[in-house]
Image: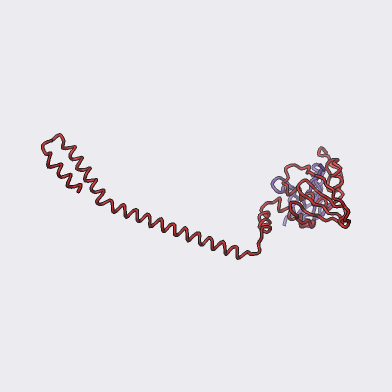
Chain colours: A purple, B red
Amino acid sequence: MNAKILTFSSHGDTTLLEYDPATADMEEINRVIAEYEAKTGAQPFDMATGERLEKVTREQNEVLMVHPIAGG
Amino acid sequence: MGLNQTLAVVYFRPASTGMVPAILSLIAFLTLVVWRFVFAGPHCRHLVRAIAARQKRHSNLLAEGLHILELGGAAAIADRPLENSADEQARLDRKDPAKRYLQRIAALTGATRMDDAYVLDVGKMQFHVRHRYVKRLRDTTDPDCAPEETCFYPVHKGMPKAEEIATALLLLTNNPGLFDKWAAQSGAFRADGQAFRPTQ
């Protein structure tokens, strides 16, 4: 089963990245996540536990990039 | 009766040769009139009866169909006597991806729905999160603790309301201190509490 990096969007969700966790280069996956984080401020959360992730590993099958929120 | 009248016209004016076509036309017309009343009348009445019978049968079928539907509805209700409107709402929500995510994240964070808000307990704190608005009780064990309120909005535009609430639930669960940053209205903050400038 493929793993997904996704984010919320106007139509529910958008898949940013989909990969086979058994064979994927996790360094490359984390590099893509870091780039997305630098650009949007979104940070990865494990959708199985609801916890924020410092690094995505092969254990995660569904990772949600959570965007920043401002006070108003 | 009509036929007799036609014959009378023919015998009383035989010499008028110029009138022959008109007389023939009249005969034909009257014959048609006679045929119409003598033969077609019962046929029409038969047709009317047939249509009426068909309509009655159709009405009966409709009535039977409605009766079956009513019975079916009663059976469906009887099959699901414990299903209430909240279950029905949850079933409908599963069709909406944003609401589905909110339900998943509410379950992950332990938040429970209360009216239009989600109640989230983080340690002694309790948050009431609804769309773009959050209330905090700093210490639920302290009866004198007054609620504080602030607003929030996502930097990422176009997100459905349900996902905005889901985002706030995830962020507050992992970093309840974000409430103070939102209340200070000093810009946007990432999940780890670091300030974020969209131009970065």
From this viewpoint, is residue A19 visible? no
Report the side of B158 relative to B143 (left or right): left
Going 28% across and 54% down the picture, which residue do you hit?
B42
Q: Residue B125, located in which quarter of the rendered image?
A: bottom right
Check the image and report above or below for B197 versus B76: above
Q: Position of residue B53 (x, y in %)?
A: 38, 57
Going 20% across and 47% down the picture, which residue do you hit?
B2
Taking the view exactly as shown, the residue that stands out farthest to the top is B18
Q: Position of residue B169 (x, y in %)?
A: 79, 51
**Depth order, front residue of B56/A44:** B56
User: Looking at the figure, which quarter contains the C terminus of chain B?
Assistant: top right
Q: Position of residue B137 (x, y in %)?
A: 85, 52
Check the image and report above or below for B15 versus A2: above
Taking the view exactly as shown, the residue that stands out farthest to the left is B15
**Depth order, front residue of A33/A23:** A33
Q: How many marks?
A: 0
**Depth order, front residue of B7/B194:** B7
Q: Position of residue B94 (x, y in %)?
A: 68, 55
From this viewpoint, is residue B97 visible? yes
Going 59% across and 63% down the picture, which residue do you hit?
B76
